[in-house]
Amino acid sequence: MTQSFSFNAENLKKAEGFLKKYPKGREQSALLSLLDLAQTQNGGWLCEGAMAYVADFLKIHPMRVLEVASFYSLFHLKPHGKYHIQVCTTPPCSLSGSDQLLWSCKKWLGIGVGETTADGKFSLIETQCLGACTKGPVVRINQDMYENQTQETLVEVLQTLAER
Ligand code: FES
């Protein structure tokens, strides 16, 4: 069953503001901004209802929304932990040690890739290039980037987040 979704009053105002940034007939260019808004309102992920709502809002085919939402790693198509850990394992980061970072995460959290801790606090995935290749290995946790990480510095980050 599709979860229903609509922007709350505050986000509706923001969404209408995004549309005004583009020339008439080009409003669909606001798609990324609207998906980001919908994802934030929906607790960090895009349910089918949210994507359908955005498609309807922009008067575009729902498949176009799904294509975009499933392409960018900033968008999540299923629920995840409070802290969503994305370890870049593309070759530049892999050569800098991201495999070891991934191993440390799995060991420290006690979960595998694609899983969420029992308390719902952390989830872990591998991701493709995060656009900071010269500062690898790179990990993104929610909206924050952690560059030049070592196993030790990343575990410190996880410990800090666990205490929040
Ligand atoms: S390869 Fe990891 S950020 Fe580009």
Image (spheres, rainbow, N blue to C red):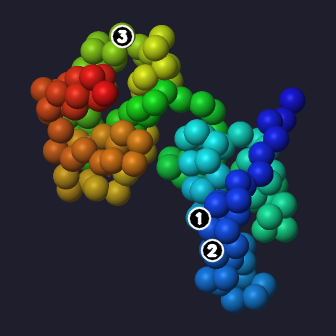
The residue identified by callout 3 is 110
Residue 70 in view here: yes
Task: Give me the residue at 41% from left, 24% from top.
Answer: 122
Give the mark nearer the N terminus: 2 vs 1.
2
Q: Position of residue 33 (x, y in %)?
A: 59, 64
The residue identified by callout 2 is 18
Q: Quadrant of residue 7?
A: bottom right
Q: Mark 2 and 1 residues: CB-CB less than 8 Å, in contact?
A: yes
What's the CA distance linking mark 3 and mark 2?
A: 41 Å
Q: Mark 3 and 2 residues: CB-CB less than 8 Å, in contact?
A: no
Q: Kindly state the secondary structure of the residue where label 1 is placed.
A: helix
The mark closer to the camera, 3 or 1, is 1
| Label 1 packing within 10 angstroms: few (<14), some (14-19), many (20+) | some
The mark closer to the camera, 3 or 2, is 2
What's the CA distance linking mark 2 and mark 1?
A: 7 Å
| Label 3 packing within 10 angstroms: few (<14), some (14-19), many (20+) | few
The residue identified by callout 1 is 33
Q: Quadrant of residue 123?
A: top left
Give the mark nearer the N terminus: 3 vs 1.
1
Pick the front one: 9 or 135: 9
Q: Amino acid at mark 3?
A: Gly
Q: Kindly state the secondary structure of the residue where label 3 is placed.
A: loop
Q: Amino acid at mark 1?
A: Ser
Q: Amino acid at mark 2?
A: Phe
